[in-house]
Image (tube, grey):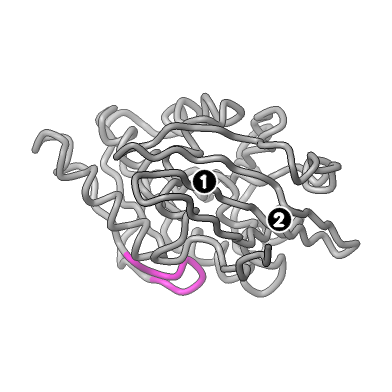
């Protein structure tokens, strides 16, 4: 049987987009990240999230009383976030909004108490000019004394031996009678710090079985030089998230 073509991650009709919440909910390694971010923001403060996706973190922070702007460049992900926002009570919904923009080139014309670049968002970009532009944007949008937090994966985890391609890494039941089985079809890690992960999504539902392959790419790099060049300063010890990586902290002078 021929394999399906490999598609990019987070496309409008991709399985990675449709089942993002289901997969993330099953990932226990990131439990506690919302508490970390909430602890960085003053009560009732303002926060900008880069890579807000379907709103997992932005909506949770709004529910805790923070005023949140969630930025992402994937329309299909933002569409899910807005649906979830509409299901909240008006008091919470009014505290959060979502913006479609490229995090390397945006200007919201205001500053925030905190800017958070969550769950490997920066790692989707090569560590170079695009990291430089992202940190400059973070610095521009931070109020004096504000804190920036950037969650990145561990190099050792990126280069770890993947499970066999026949062994499921996730089996979850989803909405509308669907179930998802997820496999790692292949994984490579280059000397330059690039990881390419080909994930196989097998979706069983009322209409039969659908199988897709999607490529997830992460880049490893040291964020400190980019943060310092953008005018930020160390903001405390990085937060160890175990096998989920590290949340690096910076502060605007």
Check the image and report above or below for 236 versus 112. Answer: above
- Dot 1 or dot 2: first in sequence order is 1
Relative horizontal placement of residue 140, taking residue 153 as reference (left or right): left
Foreground residue, 9 or 235? 9
Q: Residue at x 45, y 30 (%)?
A: 34
- Which secondary structure lies at badge 1? loop
Q: Does residue 221 appear left or right of residue 12 in this picture?
A: right
- For the magenta stretch, what is the residue range? 100-106
Say what secondary structure mark 2 lies in.
strand
Residue 114 visible in the picture: yes
Q: Residues within 10 Å of mark 2 (few under 14, many from 20)?
A: some
Q: Viewed as shown, does residue 250 lie left or right of 88?
A: right
Give the image location of residue 146, x and y in percent. 45, 45
Q: Look at 57% across and 68% down and name the residue there.
A: 7
Q: Main secondary structure of the magenta part?
A: loop
Is 104 inside the magenta-drawn segment?
A: yes
Of residues 8 and 183, the one nearer the viewer is 183
State the CA–CA distance, disc 1 to disc 2.
Answer: 19 Å
Residue designated by label 2: 197
| Residue annotated with mark 1 | 118
**Which quadrant, please, contains the N terminus?**
bottom right
Residue 137 image point, x, y percent:
49, 65
């Amino acid at each position: 049987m021929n394999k399906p073509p490999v598609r990019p991650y987070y496309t409008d009709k991709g399985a990675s987009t449709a089942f993002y919440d289901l997969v993330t909910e099953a990932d226990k390694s990131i439990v506690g990240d919302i508490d970390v971010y909430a602890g960085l923001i003053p009560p009732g403060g303002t926060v900008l999230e880069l890579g807000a996706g379907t709103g997992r973190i932005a909506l949770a922070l709004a529910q805790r009383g923070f005023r949140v702007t969630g930025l992402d460049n994937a329309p299909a992900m933002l569409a899910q976030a807005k649906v979830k926002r509409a299901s909240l009570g008006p008091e919470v919904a009014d505290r959060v909004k979502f913006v479609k923009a490229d995090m390397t080139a945006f200007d919201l014309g205001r500053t925030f108490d905190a800017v958070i670049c969550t769950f490997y968002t920066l790692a989707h970009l090569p560590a170079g000019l695009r990291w430089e532009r992202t940190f400059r944007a973070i610095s521009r949008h931070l109020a004096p004394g504000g804190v920036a937090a950037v969650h990145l994966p561990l190099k050792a985890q990126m280069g770890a031996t993947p499970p066999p391609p026949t062994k499921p890494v996730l089996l979850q039941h989803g909405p509308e009678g669907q179930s998802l089985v997820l496999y790692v079809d292949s994984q490579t890690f280059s000397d330059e710090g690039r990881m390419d992960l080909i994930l196989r999504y097998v979706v069983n539902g009322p209409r039969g079985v659908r199988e897709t392959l999607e490529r997830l790419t992460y880049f490893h790099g040291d964020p400190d030089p980019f943060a310092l060049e953008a005018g930020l300063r160390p903001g405390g010890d990085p937060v160890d998230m175990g096998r989920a990586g590290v949340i690096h902290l910076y502060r605007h002078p």
